[in-house]
Image (cartoon, rainbow, N blue to C red):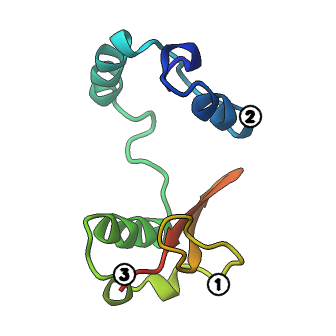
Amino acid sequence: MQEPNDTEVPDLPRNALRRVEADEIVPIEQMGKLLSLLVAESIIGGKPKVSEKERERMEIEGGIAKEDNAFERGILSLGEPSLFTCPECHKEARPVFAVTPATLFRSIVS
């Protein structure tokens, strides 16, 4: 995570840090080097421990993020309707997957 005092809007990373623990917090000048090191590391114990269900959900989310049609990609199977709406498009937002203690929401756009 980028060092909060090194950002244009320090409250964004500060709020994230209130909800989750960051493995690394660095100034932006060190971010490229850190990412290079992390990508080069091998995963302890071999493959990442992601369930088939979570892998499927991430594939759907990735497709939607690439601007595929959310309904065709199966967004309705990803979560129950929520009370949240997207602040930009005002469409319903569904929980896509949870990374404890935070949940990613995706607005339903056809």
Alpha carbon distance from label 1 to label 3: 14 Å
Question: Type of residue at label 2?
Answer: Arg
Residue drawn at the location 29% of the way across and 82% of the way down: 69
Which mark is on residue 70?
Answer: 3
The spot of residue 54 in percent (x, y) is 49, 66
Toward which corner of the image does residue 55 lie, by quadrant? bottom left
Q: Is 19 or 6 nearer to us in this picture?
A: 6
Disc 1 is placed on an element classified as loop
Residue drawn at the location 38% of the way across and 47% of the way down: 47
**Crowd around label 2: few <14 · some 14–19 · many ≥20 (10 Å):** few
**Crowd around label 3: few <14 · some 14–19 · many ≥20 (10 Å):** some
Question: Type of residue at label 3?
Answer: Ala
Q: Is 7 or 32 nearer to us in this picture?
A: 7
Dot 1 or dot 3: first in sequence order is 3
Disc 3 is placed on an element classified as helix
Residue drawn at the location 48% of the way across and 14% of the way down: 26
Question: Type of residue at label 1?
Answer: Pro
Residue drawn at the location 68% of the way across and 78% of the way down: 82
| Quadrant location of the C terminus in the rendered image | bottom left
Q: Mark 2 — residue? A: 18
